[in-house]
Image (cartoon, rainbow, N blue to C red):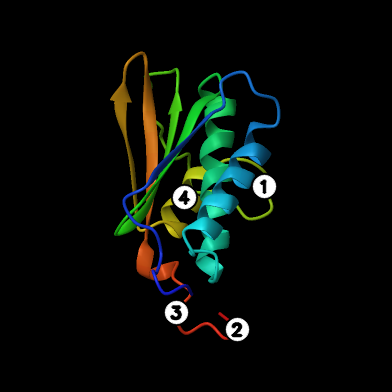
Amino acid sequence: MSARGPVVGQRRRLALGGVRGAVGKGRDFTRRALRDWEWDGRESAEDALLVVSELVTNAALHAHGCEELALTSGETLRIEVLDGVTEQPRPGAVPRPGVPGGHGLHLVRRLSDRWGCYPAGTGKVVWAEIDSSRLTARGVPGR
């Protein structure tokens, strides 16, 4: 870890409206931010990438696509996905093992410390937060 420590209070945004491969681009964008913020030294960083994948995928499947992915560093990593549909997300029935689909919001709920949504213009923002203490590399061998 550098002498200055992780960056906090920074916000990064990625426009994804109409972009092919939005999930992969969102993951790459998030991976770079986590590395820059020195939050890539824990398994929880992989959890953050999975949360991004699920939120962007849900926007594609249920809300005509993801318009924007925003990441904010602070006491938490806040992940926000803006889409163009006002309908609030609803976790489906309890997913059954081995049956594809219906697992996205259940994964988000399990991997994040908090999640929710709020209206934004003609759409909504679905967000999730992971406490920064779960992402720091302090005490990780080789860091």
Which one is earlier in the sequence, the residue at label 3 or at label 4?
A: 4
Q: Quadrant of the rendered structure where residue 3 is?
A: bottom left
Task: Name the residue carrying label 2.
Answer: 142
Which one is earlier in the sequence, the residue at label 1 or at label 3?
A: 1
Task: Name the residue carrying label 3.
Answer: 138
At mark 2, the secondary structure is loop
At mark 3, the secondary structure is loop
Residue visible at 52% across and 82% down in the picture:
140
Left or right of 24 in this view: 140: left
Q: Where is residue 62 in the image (x, y as percent from the top left)?
A: 53, 25
Q: Where is residue 6 in the image (x, y as percent from the top left)?
A: 41, 64
Numbered badge on residue 99: 1
User: Quick check: marks 1 and 3 in contact, CB under 8 Å?
Assistant: no
User: Quick check: marks 3 and 2 in contact, CB under 8 Å?
Assistant: no
Per the model, the C-alpha gap separating discs 3 and 2 is 10 Å
Does residue 50 appear anywhere in the picture?
no
Per the model, the C-alpha gap separating discs 1 and 3 is 38 Å
Residue visible at 54% across and 71% down in the picture:
41
Per the model, the C-alpha gap separating discs 4 and 2 is 29 Å
Which one is earlier in the sequence, the residue at label 4 or at label 1?
A: 1
Q: Position of residue 111 (x, y in %)?
A: 46, 58
Label 4: few (<14), some (14–19) or many (≥20) C-alpha neighbours in 10 Å: many
At mark 4, the secondary structure is helix
Q: Dividing the image into 4 quarters, which one contains the C terminus?
A: bottom right
Which one is earlier in the sequence, the residue at label 1 or at label 2?
A: 1
Q: What residue type is labelled 3?
A: Arg
- Of badges 4 and 2, nearer the viewer stands 2
Establish if 16 lies above or below 34: above
Task: Name the residue carrying label 4.
Answer: 108
